[in-house]
Amino acid sequence: MPLPKTHLIIGILIVLLLKIFWLHDISWLTMIVIVIANVLIDFDHYIAACFATKRFLLLKNAYLYCINDDKTKVADLHLFHTVEFHLFVLIICFIFLFLSFPIFIIESSFAIIIGMIIHSLVDFINMAYHKESWRRYYSLIWWFIKR
């Protein structure tokens, strides 16, 4: 799985390409939210490491746990990477839209889901390239069934 630095670089490149070729009037704030969401979605790796070790970890130790993960087994559940969590955030976006929240909240919420989708696509492409796509639970339902 790509490191946060890789997600940051790819996120910046994608939002710049979006600004140049498609969404010319996208605000800088929205672009920043997309990039931040693209990186912060990996916080679930920290949560999974804490659950796996049954203790709170320093970020460095959680990073080492994830890096030294056994590549021959299915990885821990990464909740923020699941289809259900993506749908949950998308539903919240539409609730904000239909309840006429301020435009910056609506734009920011949709920017979060865009950042999450970019992140998940980069992860999937990377895992497919390395023939590791079988290691990730893409659905909470699938995770519950397989447990």
Image: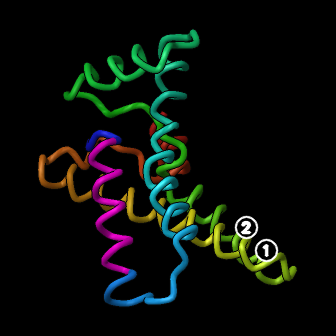
> Which secondary structure is most common in the magenta stretch?
helix
User: On screen, 51 above or below 27?
Assistant: above
Q: Is residue 109 left or right of residue 134?
A: right
User: Mark 2: which secondary structure?
Assistant: helix
User: On screen, 9 above or below 2?
Assistant: below
**Residue 46 location in percent, x, y?**
49, 28
- What residue is pinned by disc 2? 92
**Residue 6 location in percent, x, y?**
27, 47
Name the residue furthest front.
28
User: On screen, 66 above or below 100?
Assistant: above
Quadrant of image for the N terminus: top left
Q: Amino acid at mark 1?
A: Phe
Q: Is residue 97 magenta?
A: no
Q: Nearer the viewer, residue 136 or 22?
A: 22
The image quadrant of residue 113 is: bottom right
- What residue is pinned by disc 1? 96
Q: Is residue 69 left or right of residue 25?
A: left
Mark 1 to mark 2 CA distance (whole Å)? 6 Å
Q: Is residue 101 left or right of residue 51?
A: right
**Residue 111 location in percent, x, y?**
56, 69
Q: Nearer the viewer, residue 47 or 107?
A: 107
Name the residue furthest left.
130
Q: Are the residues at dot 1 and dot 2 in contact (C-beta closer than 8 Å)? A: yes
Which residue sits at x=85%, y=82%?
A: 100
Label of residue 135 in the image: none
Residue range highlighted in magenta: 5-18
Which residue sits at x=30%, y=78%?
A: 17
Q: Is residue 16 magenta?
A: yes
